[in-house]
Amino acid sequence: MLGFGCMRLPVLDGNMARIDEEKASAMIRKAIDSGVNYIDTAWSYHGSVMGQKGESEPFVGRVLKNGYREKVKLATKLPSWLINSRQDMDFFLNEQLIRLQTETVDCYLIHALDAATWKSLKALGIRDFLDTAIKEGKIRVAGFSFHDNFDLFREIVDSYNWSFCQIQYNYLDEAFQAGTAGMLYAAGKGLGVVAMEPLRGGKLARNLPEDISGVFENSGIKRTPAQWALRWVWNHPEISLLLSGMNEPSDVMQNLEAAEEGFPNSLKPDEIYILEKVRSLYGKRIKVGCTSCGYCMPCPSGVNIPGNFSYFNDYFLFDTQSLRETTVRLYNHYIKPGERPSACIECGQCEEKCPQAIQVISELKNVERTFR
């Protein structure tokens, strides 16, 4: 029920490419010794440049020596944004097997699928690649991680004989990207569902706004904010695995403690009420009432309207400067220049289609002022 995500391991001197191997090794092996049997990494994790080759895979290969490899299901991901040919797919998988010091990857994902990467990968032969890799024993089962809207998610689920999928899911993101609808659809099709970002990159665990932390503190239940968030995800029977990116030994212990009670339908009505109250307080901080329904898309000038509003709302959800700086960094990475408000030609088509009656044009100008 608990997987160890190797994207946010402790590092030396603040350098993401320098993993603190002694500390991180102890954390991962403690988790495995305590029953965790799913270890997740990727080509790009712990790189000096986002999206390029990182140090997580080679580190995981080393830490799983001395019998630990046999105790876990090992997951890694094809870097979809680097694939320009069918041959590239074979190249990266073969390199990953070497980096991980293994003959087989148990759970292989196509990383961070969105509309553009899925279109490209289909044309280049991704389904043949997966069939061949499974037949040759290089991977055991195939899945994908996802960052786009529900309609695309449903299309991808129906397009191949996947074994599992990985979606962002937490108590603030029920309607974000695949969301609850995607979780239910995939589970209904028999796919395993891995929940990533259960703590929104730690934002639901640390430095909470004072009014929100007060709700948890006054609940009468001894549970950290992180454990509240994890329990919410585990409460859903459709979730096969919660993937947590732990970066401190205390994170491992909190996660293990929460997992002792984190079963489907285990939250009591008063506990669910507490989380609803917290979500309501976060909701009051939201600047734009966008539900990411996608009715406004496609924008004729290419603006990613739901994406812009999602990061704009995130910016105001949290109080600390460091969290806001993180949101800006993610915005600049995931929202491409041509998808930003500056591309808006103010045609007004989006406002005519918006079921929430959002003044899209003026709100996009607010987004531009915030992230410029």
Image (cartoon, rainbow, N blue to C red):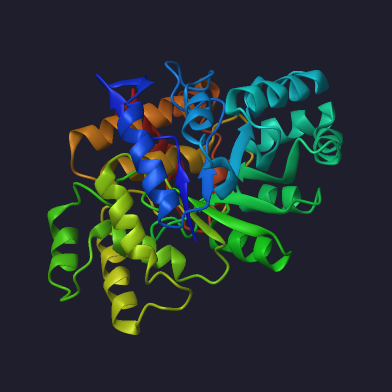
Where residue 230 appears, as percent x and y from the top left, is 37, 60
Nearer to me, 5 or 209? 5
The quadrant of the picture occupied by the C terminus is top left
Q: What residue is shown at x 27% (from left), y 30% (from top)?
A: 325
**How many numbered dots are placed on residues in this image?**
0
Q: Residue 224 occupies which quadrant of the picture? A: bottom left
Where residue 354 appears, as percent x and y from the top left, is 53, 53
Q: Is residue 344 left or right of residue 365?
A: right
Where residue 338 appears, as percent x and y from the top left, is 54, 22
Nearer to me, 55 or 264? 55
Nearer to me, 244 or 119? 244
- Residue found at the very far front of the displayed protein: 66
Q: Is residue 184 left or right of residue 26?
A: right
Q: What residue is shown at x 17% (from left), y 74% (from top)?
A: 219
Where residue 187 appears, as percent x and y from the top left, is 66, 65
Q: What residue is shown at x 41% (from left), y 78% (from top)?
A: 266
372 to 259, vertically: above or below: above
- Residue found at the very far bottom of the displayed protein: 269
The answer to whether any part of residue 171 appears in the image is yes
Q: What residue is shown at x 47% (from left), y 58% (from top)?
A: 356
Nearer to me, 161 or 306? 161
328 to 207, vertically: above or below: above
The answer to whether any part of residue 146 appears in the image is no
